[in-house]
Every structure is written in C-alpha cells, then in structure tokens.
Image: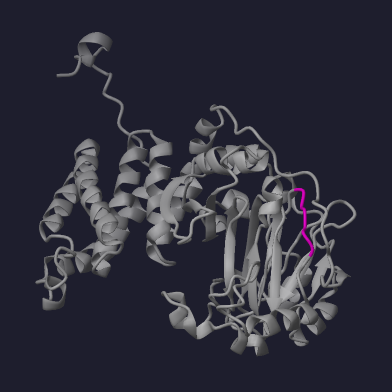
Amino acid sequence: MGPDLAALFGEDVEPEEVQVHPALLSAVSALLGEAWPVARAELLGEATQEAKDKEPRLPLPPRLARDMDDALGALERRAWAECAAQAEKIKSEAWAALMRDKTWQRPCDKELFILVQLLLALCAHASASPADAMRHVDEAFVFAAAGPFRSCALLFVRLLDEDAAAARRKEDPVEGSFPAETPAGSTSGALERLPAPSPQELGQLLSQRRPFRFGGALEAWPARKWTLQHLDQVAGHRLVPTELGRADSESGELREELMPLGRFLRDHLAPSCRGVTGATTSTAYLAQHELFEQCPVLRADVPVPSCWQQVLGAPSRCNAWVGTSSTVTPCHWDSYDNFLAQVQGFKRVALLAPEQRSKLYVEESVGRTAAQGNLSPVNVEDPDLEKYPNFAGAAAGGREWLGFSAFQEVSARTPFPRPLQAMLGGRDRFPLEAIRRPSHCFASSRLDRFWEKHGLRLQAATLFDSGSPFIPQMFE
C-alpha cells in the first residue's frame, strides 16, 4: 500500500499521472484496432494439415490470442505494468518460435510479434524509459515491412529518439578511428576517374549502359563529420541486425544477431580499425539494412544533390553496409542499375561484362539466391581453375573491359544515389570517387586481407524510382 499523500501534503495533492504522448497512444491504438482483429482470427483458426505435418514447427498457439486480449484490456485501463507483463510473455514465446524454426509459420505470427513490440514500447514510454521504448521500436522496425507497422515505429523514433540518445551520450565513447592512410597498390585496369558530372553529362553517362567512376560531387555533405564516436553518440543505442562469423571459415556461414549499434562499433569495428589480434579473422557485417530510414538523424547527413534528382528523381530507398575487414560480397549480378558509395575505409570491386555469364558457373550455385540465377560460386579473388576452368577467360575479359577499381579511402563521406553502382572515396586530392555498374553485370567485392588494418567499410546506396530508365528494386 502506497503512502497517504493527502495526510503528508494536504487534501489538494493527487498522485501524479503518467504522461503518455497522445500521438503515440493514438497511433498504437489505431494500429491495434485495424490489425489485431485480422491477426487474432488467424491465430484462433485451425492449423492446416500441412502445418501439423511440420511438427514441431507449429504456428504460435491460439492461447496467445487470449493473452493479447488481456494485454489490451490492461491498456484500456492504463494498467501499464500489467500490460507490459502480458506483452512480454507473448513476445518471449513468439521470439522462441522464430529462433527454433528460423521463420514464423504464418503472417499473423510475425504481426503478433510486431504489435507486441509496439505495445511494449508504449508501456516503456509510459514508464519514462525512452531507451527501453526505442529498443522495442527497433525490434518492430527490423521485422516490419514498409507500411502501417513501420510508420507507427517511426513515429516513436521521431518523438522519443532524442531523449534516448541523450542518455547514451553519458556513457563512455567508443575508442578508435577510421583508417587515415590510403594503402598502396596497383591501380592497373581501374576505371578512369571523371569529374563530377552535370545533369546533362550524367544523363549521357547513364544512357551508355557502361560503368563509370567520378569524384568530387559530395564535398559539402554533413556526413563528413562521421567518426566512430559520432555514430556511437547519435545512434549507438539503436538495435541493428548484424551477421557475425569468421573470415577463415570454410563454410562461410554467418550467424545473425540483433545488437546495439554502439556495441557493434565498440566490439567489432573499432578493433578492426586498430588491427587488434583476432579482429582480422572475425567478421561482423551490417548488410543491406535500411539504417537511414530507421535513424533519420543519420539520413539528414546524406542529402541527395539536386543535379542528381533532376536526372533520377527522388530517392525511394537508402540502404547501409557497415563491416569489418575481410567481409566479402560473392560474385553476383543485380537486375537493376545502382551506385555504391564508399564512405569510410577501402574496398575493391571487380566487374565482369554480362556476356561472361556462361563462364561464371551460375547454374552450379546452391541456396536461396541461386534460385534467382544471380550468384556465381567462383571466388573471384582466388579462383579454383581446376574446378572452374572456364573462369580464366572470364577474368581476363572482365579486366580488359573495366578491371578492378583502385582501393579508395574516404574521410567521412556518405551514400550516394543509386540506380547504378558507385564507389565514393578519396583523400583531399581524390575526393569522393564513384563507380557506376550497369545491371546484369557480374560483380564481386571484398576487403583484401592484406589491408585488414585499413579495411573498415561504411557504405550505402540510394535507389531511385522515377525519372530513371532502370528497374527500381531493392539492392541485393
């Protein structure tokens, strides 16, 4: 039983009510009112025979629908602690099912998880815990596709992220810095570096359907201030999906883990920058993630140059790749044209003409991506010519066509527009390099182990979907 406030302070004193932002309460309530009845009906429905045959990979049990009803009842009464306790139980069971089966069996299973995360975020907000609220919001964002679920999550970001970041700034900063020296190496066969094109010149370059590289376009970008410490201070509290593994692993398999960006920077990127023993054999990768939508404070640092918008239209998506040294993207092709922007560190990109496809053994690939016919099993850096003898001709033809890009070093730059592929880099004398790669051109990229101490990458790309002759799709 709580203290008698009236006896202590007088009859006019009342317990302070929890202040919940009305926009957040309204958004979560509206989303629950629209999405929960549909998900609830599916949860309570009889499992199909196909689902029963997959035991123990069964859908989430119907009783969770009743548990969710209890949580919503507590929400109506503004019983925040009771609501959070019920929601936490549901979340734990839904997460356990995902970890066990590597997928959810029905759409309603995932929707229940996302709804519960948003409900927990609201409860954390009601408890004056913005950091906990943002943690739940990020777990919802990572699993939510574009639409009302993600829009609701981003409303929390807009209203609560600054408070959560302020608490983060009180912690010890990440120690370390991005590489500061460009490694020496051969640039034979590299693309000619062009000056930053005008809108007319850019249109002409795109119409040629051939790769190109340019520099000096983004000197004024606010993202030049990016450092390990800055990223940690403004977004270190945000949860991001990472892939962890070992560069010397024969299988090349990576395990996925959600972790705070600050821990990713502290435990993986900073040691990689410093060349710490052991960091050269472990890899950590935040790959193709919509970090700039999740963290608008970072997206504000990467405005698209107006001249590019004149040719390509407004960007529809912006993805980020952040990785340690020795991370590798296998040889593959994309069904759209794109730019790749190298913001920090160094990367080598090998491009092969589309007519070399027959020499890349694409049909011999296995796995999910192979079903799309876009992945080559050949290690471009160290090909096994006994196993893939035809690749010898492809490699020669590829280098003759455009070869390997030079290693690029960037001081703190950011993503670039992309219905093509570009590399941005350079020191003061080579500011912001770019390479354009047409669609259906095979590409392989990696950070050579020779440059392990300099191999940190922070990359991003933007996809345009209007005013462009290319197919707008997500970057693979």
Residue 218, compared with residue 310, is above or below; it is: above
Where is residue 199, by image quadrant? bottom right
Q: Main secondary structure of the magenta part?
A: loop
Q: Give the residue drawn at x 82%, y 70%.
A: 190
Residue 27: horizontal and vertical position, in percent? 36, 55
Q: Which residues are magenta?
A: 406-411
452 or 96: which is nearer to us? 452
Residue 55 magenta: no
Is any part of residue 21 visible from this angle? Answer: no
36 or 371: which is nearer to us? 371
Residue 6, compared with residue 74, is above or below; it is: above
Residue 112, compared with residue 12, is above or below; it is: below
Q: Give the residue drawn at x 83%, y 62%.
A: 186
Q: Give the residue drawn at x 39%, y 34%.
A: 129
Residue 150: horizontal and vertical position, in percent? 42, 60
Residue 114: horizontal and vertical position, in percent? 32, 57
Residue 409 magenta: yes
